[in-house]
Image (cartoon, helix red, strand yellow):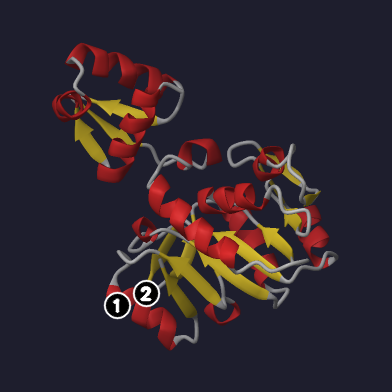
Amino acid sequence: MHPRHSVILELVNGAGRISVVDLSAQLGVSEVTVRQDLTLLENQGFLKRVHGAAVVLDSDNPEHRLWANSKTKQAIAEYAYSLIGHDDSVLIEGGSVNVMLAKLLADRADVSIVTSSSFIAHQLRHGKAEVILLGGQYQSSSESLVGPLTRLCIEHVHFSKAFIGVDGYDIQTGFTNRNMMRADIANAILNKGQETFVLTDSSKFGRIFPAAIGPMNLIKHVITDTKAPALSISTLKSQGIDVHLV
């Protein structure tokens, strides 16, 4: 990807919507060039063009979601990495922050990684960490394994820590996911009763999606950034969840 395209994705995902005029000014290129860039990025599925602007694309594709708030997500992933000890066996469910965490673990020969994400497994193909990819129905939109076979696999594997991704959090609904099949797998992981971490940046707070993740008393930790709403953080803490702000 061209470095300018990476900057465009950072700006669009950070603002939610940004005009061609503003992109031209910030990038120091003509509006014609910006429009050409936006057309290319839209064709690749990274954003959506509207009249005179570009808007963020709500996508389940892990490759696309990596570009949204990437610096914040990287900081969350690095903090999560610091909590993984020697000889830990960790389950990494999916989501863009978890992809970054998995990449950090790639060369840890002392760590075993269990995952339901074929995208994550592919990212680790040249690493030293042992990778166990769970079986199940392949869901192309999220590049994940889902369904009854995946739940059965989770019941028969063991791990010391689990890291799951979410799409939304609201005080009334708790954590939610836009993808019901992925939420089902996250709930199967929670039911194992192991030390489970939700990794999410603050942009997910205040958003509600159809599929519930919980119950909340099965979630031990939440790692997010300091922009998360204070009321949401206090609510999580009141439910006995250890909140880590980075």
Q: Earlier in the sequence, mark 1 or mark 2?
A: 2
Residue shown at 77% from the left, 55% from the top: 150
* Residue 99 appears left or right of 17: right
> Residue beneath label 1, please?
231
Residue shown at 55% from the left, 64% from the top: 80
One can see residue 211 in this view: no
> Residue beneath label 2, please?
171
Which one is in front, 12 or 105?
A: 105
Against 56, residue 111 (above or below) is: below
As drawn, the label of residue 197 is: none
Image location of residue 245, percent across then percent down: 40, 70
* Residue 179 appears left or right of 200: right
Q: Residues within 10 Å of mark 2 (few under 14, many from 20)?
A: some
Residue shown at 76% from the left, 50% from the top: 129
Mark 1 or 2: the one toward you? 1
* Residue 139 appears left or right of 170: right
Q: Amino acid at mark 1?
A: Leu
Q: Secondary structure at mark 1?
A: helix
Q: Amino acid at mark 2?
A: Ile
Q: CA distance from mark 1 to mark 2?
A: 8 Å
